[in-house]
Amino acid sequence: MKLGKVDATEETGLGSRFEVKGYPTLKFFIGGDAIEYNGPREKDGILNWLRKKTQPSTTLLSDSESIEKAKTDNEAVGVFFGGEDSEEFGLW
């Protein structure tokens, strides 16, 4: 991950291109598409948001306790019934 800082009061073209309307503005880019950050303006809040954006899209839940925790945390939970050595398991 790379972090960049731009002074949009000097780089007005860049600020206009990415629709910067106020300061500070934080944007996260995935494949060239910008996602604007609207969370807390302190280090921990920003880092937590970045971790969520960069973590793996799936997590192996190997027991019923971890599945129940994921359900109570309001996470999307898909359950695959089969062995880890099956061809279908690799699709996840």
Image (cartoon, helix red, strand yellow):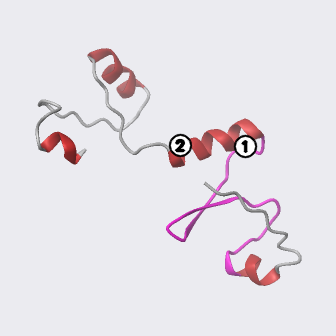
Where residue 26 appears, as percent x and y from the top left, is 71, 58
**Residue 21 belongs to the span the image colors magenta:** yes
* In the rendered image, the vertical position of residue 47 relative to residue 31, given as above or below: above
Q: Hey, what amino acid is under mark 2?
A: Lys
Task: Quarter of the image for the N terminus: give it.
Answer: bottom right
Q: Which residue is mark 2?
A: 52
Mark 1 neighbour class, 10 Å CA radius: few under 14, some 14 to 19, many 20 or more: few
Q: Quadrant of the C terminus?
A: top left
Left-right relation of 88 to 9: left
In the image, which is nearer the foreground, mark 1 or mark 2? Answer: 2
Q: Which residue is disc 1 drawn over?
A: 40
Q: Whole-Å distance between the Cαs marked 1 and 2?
A: 14 Å
- Where 86 sits versus 35, above or below? above
Up/down of 52 relative to 61, above or below? below
Q: Identify the amino acid type marked 1.
A: Pro
Q: Is residue 13 left or right of residue 84?
A: right
Main secondary-structure element of the magenta-colored stretch: loop
Q: Residue at x 69, y 44 (%)?
A: 46
Q: Are marks 1 and 2 in contact (CB under 8 Å)?
A: no
Q: Residue at x 53, y 48 (%)?
A: 53
Query: Would residue 58 be found to the left or right of residue 7 on screen?
Result: left
Quadrant in the picture for residue 49: top right
Numbered disc total: 2
